[in-house]
Amino acid sequence: MERLAALERLKALREQERKEEEGEEESRRRVDEAVARRVEEELESRRDWIEEEVARRVAAAKAEMEAAMMAEVEKSRGEYLAEETRKEEDERERGLELDRILEANQRKVEEQRRRLGEDRLRMVEDQLRIERDREKLKKKEKKAEKEEALPGLGQ
């Protein structure tokens, strides 16, 4: 019997613990529901502010992204313009170098023409001199022939 009484007390104790657990569970459930309700009410009361804050943050992020993109575009544009300016300067330098080469070649051609003209003039002068010398020689030969013929006539 003692054993039966101990079993009954144990059963009653377990029943009491079960009811306490159910009570605690019910209390937790009610607290969770109350907290959820309070959170929902708080969210609802702050909805406009939250939406405005989200919109403000989105706009700020968008503006920041746009500014970064514009900075990148400007940087790329600047690099492109610098490259184009460098290319134009290179082209201008090449053009100036070609002009210098052309002028040097023209000077060489003019110098060659001048030398050729001088050489032709010298050749013409040489030909005239040779022709004069030939004429003088012919005259001397004729004179010498006449002198040879004349003294022979007188003997």
Image (tube, rainbow, N blue to C red):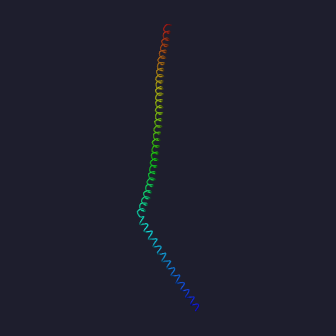
Q: Position of residue 125 (x, y in %)?
A: 47, 22
Q: Position of residue 45 (x, y in %)?
A: 41, 65
**Above-or-below relation of 51 to 110:** below
**Above-or-below relation of 71 to 90:** below
Q: Position of residue 107 (x, y in %)?
A: 47, 31
In which quadrant will I find the N terminus? bottom right
Seen as rendered, the residue at the extreme right is 2
Q: Position of residue 79 (x, y in %)?
A: 47, 47
**Above-or-below relation of 135 to 82:** above
Seen as rendered, the residue at the extreme bottom is 1
Q: In this view of the protein, which residue sits in the foreground, 145 or 117?
A: 117
Seen as rendered, the residue at the extreme top is 154
Q: Count of labels shown?
A: 0
**Above-or-below relation of 109 to 24:** above
Q: In this view of the protein, which residue sits in the foreground, 1 or 104?
A: 1
Q: In this view of the protein, which residue sits in the foreground, 103 or 80?
A: 80
